[in-house]
Amino acid sequence: MNTTMEAITEVEETLSELRQTFKSGRTRSVAWRKNQVSALLQLIHDQEDEIFKALYEDLGKHPVEVYRDEIGIVKKTINYTLSNLEKWVAPKKSRLPLLLFPTSGEVLPEPLGVVLIFASWNFPIALGLDPVIGAISAGNTVVLKPSEQAPACSSFLANTIPQYMDSKAVRVIEGGAEISELLLQQKWDKIFFTGSPQVGRIVMSAAAKNLTPVTLELGGKCPTILDSFSNPSDLKVAIKRIVGGKWGPCNGQACIGVDYILIEEKLASTLIELLKKTVKRFYSDSPKDSKCIARVINRGHFERLRNLLKDPLVAASIVHGGSLDEENLFIEPTILLDPPLDAAIMTEEIFGPLLPIITLKSIQESIEFINSRPKPLAIYAFTKDEEFRQRILLETSSGSVIFNDVLIQFICDALPFGGVGQSGFGRYHGKYSFDTFSHEKVVMRGNFIVELEPRYPPWNDFKMNFFRLAYNLDYLGLLLLFLGLKR
């Protein structure tokens, strides 16, 4: 679809239809919400092979990786949502000051309206459908805009979602940057964006014109702190998890992936040897032929990654890998030791299979190193030192902190997922997705049984003292209320 009058008309008509559906009240029914979420589960079940094909075509992902990072994630989220939805939509009673007795109060979650969701290309199924589940469970109507950089997955979503879900409430609009710009010109009740900070700024700027609330799931350079271990087996487990977290999910093209490692100088050589052995074990001597590792999404990103390595000082820091296959858009797992800290590879999010190792005199210096850079989406820290853990928690800021593992926060529906500062703001997953697409409306119910006379003029010293006591000594509020009724 091009940005022509036809495209503008189609977008406006789609938005109008979704608004009419929302105004009809149909999406507020818990039964409707469950039906739509269940239909999405059926879609995933029926179309599993097509999902495998689409993700292989776009990114070269192995079916096991697809199930682990995409299909399984969506199924888990759906089942969790269906199990808890009735509890989520129920009003939550709140305790009020005794001064207000016998008034009652509660918080009632209500849908926001018509929401726009931008999905990213690296996990185009999971990062497209996960927020859709939250939006639908909260009772909204939805436009999903898949990334044009994953065309097979975009086409799959556009063609299959209408077959399973209410097409008057859930729509998929495909297209490039011009369509995204057109969508951003419309008035929405919520925009949810997953992608780069650069595009996130554009989204936020457009949303500000209509005071539209925005959730930005961005990224950043997620550091991994690797402390020393007295037990060699602990170090080996840590290395396995780092290698799996760096190159396993989309070959490093993940916002929560390991971006670089911080380690003491004396441990660097041991780390490098263990990384090499583990990479070979996981991906063989020829990772390109192992079919266990994804390729770079497109030529533009391939060139971006190649440019990171063109700096002579960066190239000189390569201690493993570094080969590039432009024809197949493949870059092998590459390890670098102490590249220049002012080089692009250490100032920009890598989002690819390049792993710098930065050495420090003391691992305690890692806190200052992290704090000298923008707040990351995640900090990974492998350490058994409880005092060091507390320092990391108290002296750094990030979307999440994970000790002795990597990436596991993404699969936890009971925990919020999101960034802080330049790594994004807002949160989702499980109940937090429902909350992100809901407005918590305060409802209070007064009555005519009791009338509190001191709340009305004319004012006098008694009424001043009444309120001083009522607010500062809440447990006396009820007694004061009755004493002051007719004063």
Image (cartoon, helix red, strand yellow):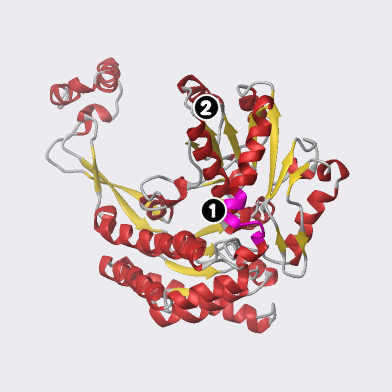
Give the vertical position of 443 relative to 474 (above or below): below
User: Depth-wise, is mark 2 or mark 1 nearer the camera?
Assistant: 2
Residue 325 x %, y %: 76, 64
Q: Residue at x 52, y 38 (%)?
A: 236
Q: Which quadrant is home to the C terminus?
A: top left
Q: Which residues are magenta?
A: 279-287
Judge by depth and name the residue closer to the eye, 159 or 223: 223
Task: Classify mark 2: helix, strand or loop.
Answer: loop
Viewer-side residue, 2 vs 114: 2
Disc 2 and disc 1: Cα gap in Å? 43 Å
Q: Earlier in the sequence, mark 2 or mark 1?
A: 1
Amino acid at the residue labelled 1: Val
In magenta segment, residue 318:
no
Is 223 situated left or right of 20 in this image? right
Q: Is residue 173 visible?
A: no
Q: Quadrant of the N terminus?
A: bottom right
Q: Which residue is mark 1?
A: 214
| SS under mark 1 | strand
Compared across the picture, whether 470 is left or right of 125 comes to left
Residue, x 51% and y 31% (percent of image)? Answer: 232
The residue that appears at 66% across and 50% down in the rendered structure is 197
Residue 447 % position (x, y): 16, 43
> How many marks on residues?
2
Q: Amino acid at mark 2?
A: Phe
Image position, residue 274 (x, y; %): 61, 40
Residue under label 2, please give it.
Answer: 229
Q: Nearer the viewer, residue 281 or 245?
A: 281
Q: Position of residue 349 (x, y in %)?
A: 68, 47
Count neighbours of disc 2 (C-alpha within 10 A) and say few if under 14, some if 14 to 19, many if 20 or more: some
